[in-house]
Amino acid sequence: MSKKKKRAKNQQKNEITKGIFTVLEKRPNESFNYKQIAAKIGITDANSRNILIKKLVSLKEKKRILEVSPGKYKALAASKSYHTGRVDITGRGNAYIIIEDFDEDVFVPYNKLKKAFHGDVVQVYVFPRRKGKKLEGEIAKIVERKKTSFVGIVQMQKNYAFVRATDFRMYTDFFVPKEKIGGAKDGEKVIVTMEEWPEDADSPFGTISSVLGKPGEHNTEIHSILAEYGLPYEFPADVEQFANALDTSIKAEEIAKRRDMREVLTFTIDPKDAKDFDDALSFSVLENGNYEIGIHIADVSHYVVPNTVLDDEAYERATSVYLVDRVVPMLPEILSNNACSLRPREEKYTFSAVFEITEKAVIVNQWFGRTVINSNERFAYEEAQHIIETGQANIPEDISIRGHAYKVSNAIVEATLMLDKLAKIMRNSRMESGAISFDKVEVRFHLNEKNEPKNVYFKVAKDANKLIEEFMLLANRKVAAFIGKQKPVKPFVYRIHDVPNEDKLIALNGIVSRFGHKLNFKDKKSISASLNKLLEDVKGQKEQNLVDTLAIRSMSKAIYTTDNIGHYGLAFDYYSHFTSPIRRYPDVMVHRLLQHYLDNGNPPKAEVYEEKCRHSSDMEGLAASAERDSIKYMQIKFMEMHRDQEFLGVISGVTEWGIYVEIMENKCEGMVRIRDIKNDYFTFDEKQYAIVGERTGKSYQLGDEVMVMVKDTDLVKRHLDFTLLENKEE
């Protein structure tokens, strides 16, 4: 027998073995004869039936199945081969099932997906591992659909339509009958809602629920990004009506219940274009020479009350979403930009953390509770930075948010300078304790009136940004510790960050060593110190963005939970989110719980808050993905306007199908496909992070500088292709 025939026969035997286990373990309490099993796995020919019979006998003898009566077989009691996991579909249509307690993902080929989609929770049958092979399985049933609405493009037929999903991980289109097309036209981008997938149908049936517009148009693509992640872009009418009917006036009887801090020097520092100001700082010098510093946060929980449509909507959204051209807020504008926005010279209800601090940044006393404030001034980061750098009260016109030069009071100047000094002490202390300094470059765009990108710029964190960051971290940390250290333990919402994944750190070390850097794995503190050194050493270097990105990916993901394990990245034993309730629902929960405990309330059920934490973490992830997609979309739009320009880039990724190149001056990333590189046949060398020419031996490695030009842009798929011009060193 030839090797090819032998391989085919072994493959047939393996498929029949898998089929036997699938049938028996799907119904572990029933028994089946060979005819029933053959019918269920589609065996009709005599040769395959004979193999099936022999396999049944063999498996019985090896005690892998039971023969309960002559010729009747059943699975061993309580099969451990079924597991629940989440589907991760690859670009080629196959899938991996991510199972929480498994060290390895389970591979499921395309023909065994059983109509499961990317992100679905499924029950998967895991086949016995074959020697030297990866874990394989077959989906037994869909436990929970991740989503039932999808973005796609209409392909109109005479009496029906198909909607082709734009997500590359969707392996099927949707059949839409004529009466459910909903006015959509051929070629338009739409949202299709899946209704059913009949057993005998090639495609699921759907209804077009919304028409987004023509592919490639700005609003169409931005709304598509939101729709792909199930994120809304407008509030339901009943939520708007409820919010607009709220009494947002400041009442004397409410002020009487609060600590009155309206006479204390208070100001906000925010981005120049900010519309909502959810935090303010107050500053005063005490008689003993210490400083009283208040971190005042908009009292959203005063207006957003449980068991209302407003609270339900805020919870469902869980976060504001920041796209390149707009903010999709968690709360309606009447709250986010008005009642809860700490605008200057307006009385506002706040929830505050007030600290007595020495000149060496030692916390002497702390107080938490509801307050009322009246902010004296609003600063942009640029204006506060000017004060820090010059010590001057005069704000020049070119950095002023008011459009003309003006002078602030000496008291505000002195307060800003002292707050900056204290912030720097606190930051240094944090770094010495093992905190990691991630200052990744953030890409931003200046847009024209048509929402077209005029240019790309990078958001840089200066002293003024870090001043605000340190005091927000202080409030978050101290609020969490105040509750977390109480006995008995009380349920609370923590922001946790686990230690880094060791395998990912080893992989990161392998990559950064190519640039002359090295990580120290001796202990937890050594890892932090060497990561900080790495991030500092790459600043301004060609590999900075690549290393920053890979370092962040090596970290565990920060999440919300009631189970506190501390925050590794910040080097805090206790940490929560208290400071942004306008844009984050967990902060609203923290405010409510903190007040509940200040009022000596009984601890609520932890599992209720754990579920809310899980939902908030999930929604945060979706929002971050939407934000990344909107940046990618705008980068492609920007590059579309620079088709004929040559750019210097650095190779940021290497795969078997091509190299990814990030342009150094604007951080736009695109792909050079292997098939488009002329003069040689290139293959992927995984160990070297390179592609290598078979004839010339020429290689393109991770971190190499190359010259590229735009070859193709696709706004709909958000994909950018480059043409490789030359290796920069040549």
Image (spheres, rainbow, N blue to C red):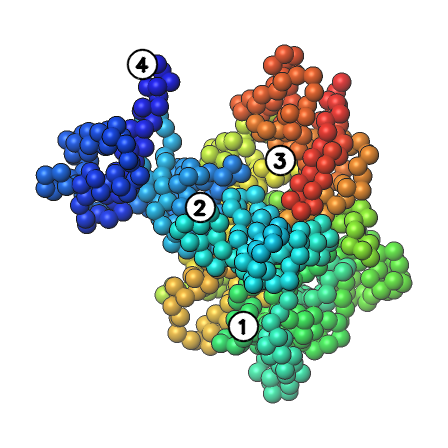
Marks 3/1: CA–CA distance = 41 Å
Residue where numbered disc 2 is placed = 87
Residue at image mark 1: 311
Q: Secondary structure at mark 1?
A: helix
- In the orientation shown, which residue stands out farthest toward the bottom? 253
| Rendered location of residue 627, percent (x, y) | 64, 52
Residue at x 79% of width, y 51% of height: 452
| Cβ atoms under marks 4 and 1 closer than 8 Å | no
Mark 2 or 3: the one toward you: 2
The residue shown at (64%, 35%) is: 546
Secondary element under disc 3, as helix, strand or loop, is helix
> Is label 2 or label 1 in front?
2
Q: CA distance from mark 4 to mark 1?
A: 71 Å
- Residue 287 against residue 464 in the figure, above or below: below
Which residue is labeled 4 in the image? Answer: 1
Residue 547 is tagged as 3
Compare marks 2 and 3 and give the one earlier in the sequence. 2
Residue extending farthest to the front is: 158
Q: What's the amino acid at mark 2?
A: Val
* Residue at mark 4 to residue at mark 2: CA–CA distance: 40 Å
Q: Amino acid at mark 4?
A: Met
* Dot 2 and dot 3 residues touching (CB under 8 Å): no
Q: Is residue 295 left or right of residue 576?
A: right
